Amino acid sequence: MRRPPPLPTPPAGTAADTPRRREWSTSRGRAADTEYGDRTGPGSAAVSPMPAADANADADADADGLRPTSTRDVWRAARARRKALRAEIRRFTQRSRRRRILWLSAVGAVVLLIGGTTAAAYSPLFAVEKITVVGATTLDAAAVEAALGEQVGTPLALVDSSEVKAALLAFPLIETYALEAKPPHDLTVRIVERTPVGVIRSEAGYTLVDAAGVALSTTADQPAGQPVLDIDGGTESVAFESAGLVVRSVPADVRALLTGVRATTADDVTLTLSSGLTVVWGSSDDSPMKSEVLTKTLISNPEASTIDVTSPHAVVVG
């Protein structure tokens, strides 16, 4: 077998035989490739520097790559990043921000409405100009309105109930009352008058009292249509309390004929009518039933002189 011919040997002193070595240039701050020949042999070549144009281009490229980043560049990059992040957040939260704005607008409108209404209610725009008394029958309504005249000019929301109460104390016939504001300028006073049950005779005259024993008025003569109360123990006794409940329970037609009420205890209330009929009522228990039985008995026994309804289930007629 034949051997292949040997490879051609490169001439001495060529670039193929020259080793390449990288050295660091202290003047440029960069790495440079330098060729060294065989310094020991007779064919060694001197160091051949790189071309000037290539060296300058490499130096500029390396200088651009190794240039340090300034603080301004970092700040600008951070600002651009924050700006982009805010834009993304606004884009994704646009609907929620719109709902929040609508809710805040609605709440603001409600608060403004309430605040404006409250401010107007306490302003002279809603001051009292007219006072109306409702429910007065025995009392003179004009006199009650005149007693409350100091409230004219006061805003409806600032009407002092304690001052109204103090003014109405001058009218003992008033049992209860209620204030009703009617914007913009009307104040209505609804009163409930006390119901007199009779008069108590004394040295001072005839004192009209209600079922609670409250003195309503005192006159020298007996008021028409009011029976005389003859109660042991006076208005503070249980006998008076029972008699008051009985008088308020009798039928209206019987109440109009009533001339006298007598009671020594809570269980022996007796009524006297103008016709001379005596009604033994007993206690105030079962008064509605006794009232109904008395009406039926009067119809069926018009000539009776005494009717005892102490036991409504067993009426005694005399």
Image: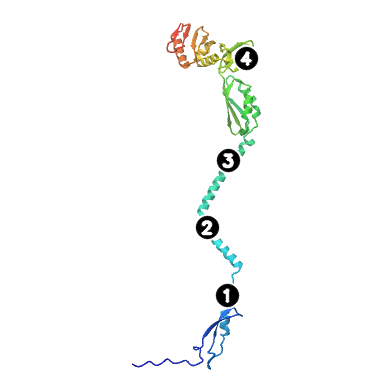
Residue 179: where, in percent of width, then height? 58, 28
Q: Which residue is mark 4?
A: 218
Comparing labels 4 and 1, the label whose residue is closer to the camera: 1
**Residue designated by label 2:** 89
* Of pointers 1 and 2, the one earlier in the residue sequence: 1
For label 1, the residue is 64
Dot 3 or dot 4: first in sequence order is 3
* Residue at screen point 49% across, 10% down: 280
Decide: is 186 above or below 256.
Answer: below
**Residue under pointer 3:** 114
Residues at marks 1 and 3 touching, judged by CB atoms closer than 8 Å: no
Please name whichever residue, 255 or 9, is drawn nearer the observer in this view of the structure. 9
Amino acid carrying label 1: it is: Asp
**What separation in Å lies between label 3 and label 4 (alpha carbons)?**
52 Å
Q: Mark 2 and 3 residues: CB-CB less than 8 Å, in contact?
A: no
Residue 26 location in percent, x, y? 60, 80
Placement of 118 over or under 66, stated as above or below: above
SS class, disc 4: strand
Q: Secondary structure at mark 2?
A: helix
Q: Amino acid at mark 4?
A: Thr
Is 17 positioned to the left or the right of 25 in the image? left
C-alpha gap between disc 1 and disc 2: 36 Å
Q: Earlier in the sequence, mark 2 or mark 4?
A: 2
For the N terminus, the quadrant is bottom left
